[in-house]
Amino acid sequence: MNDIKELKAVQLDALREVANIGAGHAATALSQMTGSTIMISVPTINIASLEDVPTQISEPEEPIAAVLMHMVGDLTGRTLLVFPRPTAMRLAELMLRRPAGSSTEMGPLEQSAIKEAGNILSGAYMNALSEFMGLMLLPSPPSLAVDMSSAILSTAFLQFGTDRDHVFYVESQFFLQEQNEHLRGFFLLLPDLASLQAILRAVRLA
Amino acid sequence: MSAPTEIRVKVADFAVANGGTLLVTVGLGSCVAIALHDPDARIGGLAHVLLPSTGMSQDRSNRAKFPSTAVPLLCERMQALGARPGRLRAKIVGGASMFTSLLSATGLQIGERNVVATRAALEHAGIPIVGQEVGGDYGRSVYFDVRDGRLTVKSLKAGHVIL
């Protein structure tokens, strides 16, 4: 398999299942950390040209907070957690045990809290993947960017990808249910092409 | 002056226009916006380039994706509208490094490489760079008024800059 467009339906199903296990663990971790109910969507597998990716996830100029982590080991690639600004602020409040609506500034403490939330979430996701597939997976320290959605996403895909024409990503949406608010975020798994193959081998579908 | 018509330029896309037009491209991260202007003819062209080299891509059909092909493309289309090559001036924006703490030990970041490749492509075409707002660690949006060549760069972190 040299081309991500050649994946068969059964392989896509397997990848979706792998992502679902990862996202389930991440949601549990987030729920424990915040004491809130977290719901996750069925993961979607996306193959898009680099040009189209940023607009598929959110409005290009929408301010977002994104936590990027590299995975190394038997699998290589990246995970990217994307929170629209309102979600990021609420998440920071939950992490810092502050009342809802009390924080408006994205200061160093808030940024640090979001980065740590990202670290825990991605760590849970990667751990679940690693155990399920019997592969070693090591997460790098997290890196945070708070800026326009398109600027962050295009760079995240471009800077580190190996295929520069198409990107392959598995997306899980999660929803944070808080009194009357519905806050959402995205978890993106971006395996390198070679690692996609390793995942499929691990679930015996290569 | 009446409000100009706005044309949005997407990622790896371009547009040329004359008269009362505002060429806009939003959310530049490591990408670079190349704005060319012929002040006498009031003709402008804007490209949103993605990758520093055609060698990094298998699909090279889109000329607006790379600096080395986007600059000649803009020149051709602008000349078709009546611009003269000798009068063209360039302004460049973008090429940021959004995730600086993950700087790899080897080589440049894509953003920096995009800027280097853009400068090389403009020099090759003999077009002087008269304004730039590049590098850094934040995203930018560009609003290019074709009437006077004025470029407004907006960002969440650094506010507005006019080139």
Image (cartoon, rainbow, N blue to C red):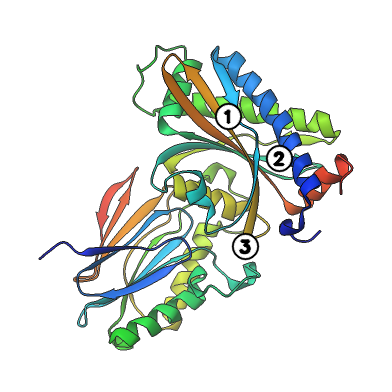
Chain letter of the residue beneath label 3 in the structure image: A
Residue A109 showing in the rendered view = no
- As drawn, the residue found furthest toward the front would be A9
Q: Earlier in the sequence, mark 1 or mark 2?
A: 2
Report the residue at 16% width, 61% height from top: B3
Residue identifier under label 1: A118
Residue type at the position of mark 1: Gly
In the rendered image, residue B147, in percent from the top left (x then y), is placed at 19, 71
Local crowd size for mark 3, using a 10 Å CA cut-off: few (<14), some (14–19), many (≥20): some
Q: x, y percentage for residue A158?
A: 58, 55
Q: Residues within 10 Å of mark 2 (few under 14, many from 20)?
A: many
Locate residue B93: give its quadrant: bottom left
Residue assigned mark 2: A71
Task: Tell me the distance, in whole angstroms, between the alpha carbons under discs 3 and 1.
Answer: 28 Å
- Residue B67, compared with residue B27, is above or below; it is below
Q: Quadrant of the N terminus of chain A?
A: bottom right
Residue B72 makes an appearance in the image: yes
In this rendering, the answer to whether B126 lies above or below B100 is below
Side of A175 where B24 appears, left or right = left
Q: Chain of mark 1?
A: A
Q: Is residue B125 left or right of residue A192?
A: left
Of badges 3 and 1, nearer the viewer stands 3
Q: Residue at x 37, y 71 (%)?
A: B15
